[in-house]
């Protein structure tokens, strides 16, 4: 049994084949023009999801590179600023050592104090450095706020926070691109110190304090003369007790209760028990020294009370030292302690800066290594994407030639078939 094909069906079938052939030729021409084998998910439903994932991965590597550039720029700027701060602090340190020369007169010390104040202004500008987008380097998360400001009553206050900016530069890898000014410049450990107190009677808050000492003994000067020895003794307190028998006044130095143990001191070293008192003569022990004037009465006491640990800002340390140099009433002993304390504070700042610069160097090395790894992974992803998405031109041109030949044959065939109509012979 044979199937009958109408003239209409023949025309439609031939037309469909022609349209399919033309679509195939045009599709190959578009692929050759774009160089892409897959331009829409319909071109290859299996490869399309892989192409989307690879493009997303390549875009992520591009973002990591942008982040790495940003982090590198920030860290390079911070390193440069910290180097400048370190150079300025070295100048401050030289001035501090110079100020410790006992041969300097008051005018010379005032000149040094004036120069130190200029260095403070210079440092204030450096710690308030702004980077990209006018962001302050050392404000933590408060990048739009100036980190250090002068207080109305003198001194400086930190306006930022303790935050660090972390920037993603790789899969599950963030790098610190900033350091808080609080840790760098606002909380510098200063040497342990002490204050001298005298016993006072318990009175209501509205009543002025009343001393229990009955003599005329007064502390003229007090200072830490050997920081290492005092640090070993700290945070213990020492009590200096005077005894008067007839015309003879002696003193003893003991640890504060409940210990009450005798303390040794002086040169040569001896236990400070019933030591003859000479007005204004140095009383030295455990790395500290004080001078008491006047005539203490029997039972009068002076306590070398350890001060609570302190942290000061870098700028405050320098300004306080400059103020001490400008004070004409400071004794040589006290000035020596000012110099010693300032040097220790400056050395602590410099040590912190050196450690931070080393960390910055390590971060920059990490960024460079991750950039290399990201670059290799990106090249691998691009190569994979090219295999999946790009066109094989040799194969495509061969297919185009073949498809074009088929289309021409179909056109010629359609032309001949279209003339096979019964009406052509009914004349």
Image (cartoon, helix red, strand yellow):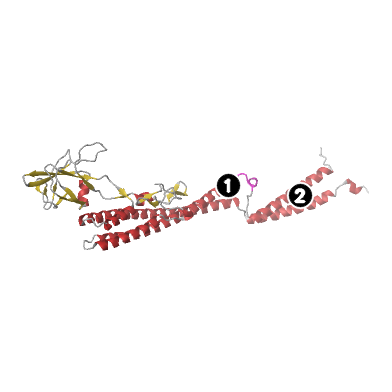
Residue 326 relative to residue 10: left or right:
left
Give the image quarter of residue 303. Answer: top left
Neighbour tally class for label 1: few under 14, some 14-19, many 20 plus, Cα within 10 Å: few
Q: Which residues are magenta?
A: 40-49
- Residue 228 painted magenta: no
For the residues labelled 1 and 2, the Cα–Cα distance comes to: 34 Å
In the rendered image, residue 365, in percent from the top left (x then y), is placed at: 41, 55
Mark 2 sits on what residue? 18
* Residue closer to the observer: 33 or 125: 125
Residue at the left extreme of this rendering: 246
**Mark 1 or 2 closer to N-term?**
2
Question: What kind of element bears circle 2?
Answer: helix
**Mark 1–mark 2 contact, CB under 8 Å?**
no
In the rendered image, residue 168, in percent from the top left (x then y), is placed at: 46, 49
In the rendered image, residue 411, in percent from the top left (x then y), is placed at: 78, 52
- The label number, if any, that marks residue 52 in the structure image: 1
Q: Is residue 94 visible?
A: no
**Considering the image in quadrants, where does the N terminus appear?**
top right
Residue 406 relative to residue 303: left or right:
right
* Residue closer to the observer: 68 or 334: 334
Neighbour tally class for label 2: few under 14, some 14-19, many 20 plus, Cα within 10 Å: some
| Residue drawn at point x = 10 percent, y = 43 percent | 243
């Amino acid at each position: 049994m044979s199937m009958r094909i109408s003239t209409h069906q023949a025309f439609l079938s031939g037309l469909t084949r022609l349209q399919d052939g033309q679509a195939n030729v045009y599709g190959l021409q578009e692929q050759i023009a774009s160089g892409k084998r897959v331009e829409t998910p319909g071109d290859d439903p299996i490869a399309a999801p892989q192409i989307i994932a690879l493009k997303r991965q390549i875009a992520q590597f591009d973002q990591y590179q942008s982040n790495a550039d940003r982090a590198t720029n920030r860290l390079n700027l911070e390193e440069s600023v910290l180097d400048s701060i370190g150079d300025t602090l070295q100048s401050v340190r030289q001035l501090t050592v110079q100020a410790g020369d006992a041969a300097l007169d008051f005018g010379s010390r005032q000149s040094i104090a004036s120069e130190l104040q200029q260095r403070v202004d210079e440092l204030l500008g450096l710690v308030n450095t702004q980077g990209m987008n006018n962001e302050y380097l050392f404000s933590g998360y408060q990048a739009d706020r100036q980190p250090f400001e002068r207080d109305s009553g003198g001194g400086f206050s930190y306006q930022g926070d303790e935050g660090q900016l972390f920037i993603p530069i790789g899969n599950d890898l963030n790098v610190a691109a900033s350091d808080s000014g609080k840790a760098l410049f606002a909380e510098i450990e200063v040497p342990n110190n002490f204050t001298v107190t005298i016993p006072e009677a318990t009175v209501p808050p509205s009543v002025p304090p009343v001393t229990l000492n009955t003599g005329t003994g007064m502390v003229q000067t007090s200072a830490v003369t050997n920081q290492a020895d005092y640090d070993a003794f700290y945070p213990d307190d020492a009590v200096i007790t005077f005894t008067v028998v007839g015309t003879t006044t002696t003193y003893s130095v003991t640890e504060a209760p409940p210990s009450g143990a005798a303390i040794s001191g002086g040169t040569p070293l001896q236990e400070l028990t019933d030591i003859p008192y000479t007005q204004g003569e140095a009383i030295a022990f455990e790395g500290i020294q004080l001078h008491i004037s006047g005539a203490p009465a029997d039972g009068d006491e002076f306590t070398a009370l350890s001060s609570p640990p302190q942290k000061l800002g870098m700028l405050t340390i320098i300004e306080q030292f400059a103020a001490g140099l400008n004070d004409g009433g400071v004794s040589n002993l006290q000035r020596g302690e000012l110099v010693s304390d300032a040097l220790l504070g400056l050395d602590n700042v410099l040590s912190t800066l050196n450690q931070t610069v080393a960390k910055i160097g390590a971060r920059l090395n990490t960024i460079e290594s991750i950039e290399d790894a990201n670059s290799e992974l990106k090249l691998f992803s691009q190569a994979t994407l090219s295999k999946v998405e790009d066109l094989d031109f040799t194969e495509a041109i061969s297919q185009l030639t073949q498809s074009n030949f088929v289309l021409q044959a179909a056109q010629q065939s359609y032309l001949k078939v279209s003339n096979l109509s019964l009406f052509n012979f009914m004349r």
